[in-house]
Every structure is written in structure tokens, then in C-alpha cells.
Image (cartoon, rainbow, N blue to C red):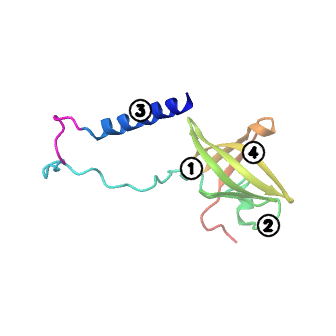
Amino acid sequence: MKPLIRLAAIASVVALAAACGETDSMEGGPVTPDPDAPLPPADPGPVQPTGHAELLGDWAAYPSWCSNSSGAERPITITLARFEGYENSCAIEQSRPLADGYELTLLCEAEGQETRETVRASADGDRMTLAYPDRDGATVALTRCPADPAP
């Protein structure tokens, strides 16, 4: 009985293969492209994120801290990829726009420990507020430092 089942299976495969080779008489040959048809758009490449441009720069709790380059009383620096502060260095893993600013997902290293936290930042001119939902909603108000702080 097994040889009969095997023979039926082989016959089914052969019939299926033969059916695939048949063509419908309605199908035409190769299609010649229309020379007047518009070309598809060029590949624009990867999308460049607009990011959190209004947050970029140095920010300090007090303007007098802008000229400090070390210690606790120094500015934080925000770039498209980094969030640098006193005793911590963070990579910005994600920047998500919100109605009133951005939510930044940070991967930080501080005192040899790696942590992940969320910061919500909103800037209005030279003032910025940082809210830390992972720290019971703590907020910090900062002032933008001039591009070339006074010595």
C-alpha cells in the first residue's frame, strides 16, 4: 500500500509542475517601459532626525556657573547624542517629541554604575525645565549659558 501512496504523491507533484509551466494566452510577453512615464523618486537615504535642537548647548542652574568647567556647580551639556553633567555621562538613546518639549531616554554611567532613566525637557528661549519622572517628578530650572562664557 505504501508504494501506491508514494506513486500517487509523485503523480500529484508531476501534475502540479506541469500546470505551473502552462501560460495563459491572455498574458503578453515582456513589458517595455513607457519612456514618458515619470521616474520613481530617488532614494532619499536615511531620515535625519530633527532631534531636540532647541535643547542643545550648555545649561546651568545659575548663570555664574556657566564659566565653571569642573565640580558640582558647573553646567550640563546637551548634544544630539549626549547629556553630560556633574558625575554622570549619558548617551541619549531616544528623543521623543512631546507637546511641550522632548522626552529623552538616557543610558547613564555614574560612579561606575550604568542606569537608564527618562528626562522630560522643555525649553523656552534661554530657560529650560527638566522633569525627572523616575525621581518622583523632581524638576530643575536651568538657564542657557552664552556660547563663549566669561572667564
| Local SS, label 4 | strand
Mark closer to the chain start, 4 or 2: 2
Image side of residue 29 versus residue 111, left or right: left
| Local SS, label 3 | helix
Q: Amino acid at mark 2?
A: Ser
Mark closer to the chain start, 1 or 2: 1
Residue 58 showing in the rendered view? no
Q: State the separation of the CA atoms marked 4 and 2.
A: 23 Å
Mark 3 = which residue?
12
In the rendered image of this protein, does residue 61 appear above or below residue 131?
below
Q: Can you name the residue that lies furthest to the bottom here?
A: 151
Q: State the separation of the CA atoms marked 3 and 2.
A: 80 Å
Q: State the separation of the CA atoms marked 4 and 3.
A: 61 Å
Between 83 and 63, the one nearer to me in the picture: 83
Mark 1 = which residue?
52
Question: Which of the two discs, 1 and 2, sits closer to the camera?
Answer: 1
Q: Which residues are magenta?
A: 23-30
Residue 79 pos. (x, y %): 61, 58
Question: Which of the two discs, 1 and 3, sits closer to the camera?
Answer: 3
Residue 52 pos. (x, y %): 56, 50
Q: Can you name the residue that lies furthest to the top here?
A: 1
**Residue density around tag 2, few if under 14, some if 14–19, many if 20 or more, within 10 Å:** few
- Quadrant of the rendering where the C terminus is positioned: bottom right
Does the stretch in magenta take in 20?
A: no
Q: Quadrant of residue 89?
A: bottom right
In the rendered image of this protein, does residue 32 appear above or below residue 150?
above
Image side of residue 28 versus residue 59, left or right: left
Q: Which mark is residue 117?
A: 4
Tell me which residue sits at (72%, 66%) in the image.
Answer: 67
Mark closer to the chain start, 4 or 3: 3
Residue 23 pos. (x, y %): 23, 38
Residue 14 pos. (x, y %): 38, 38
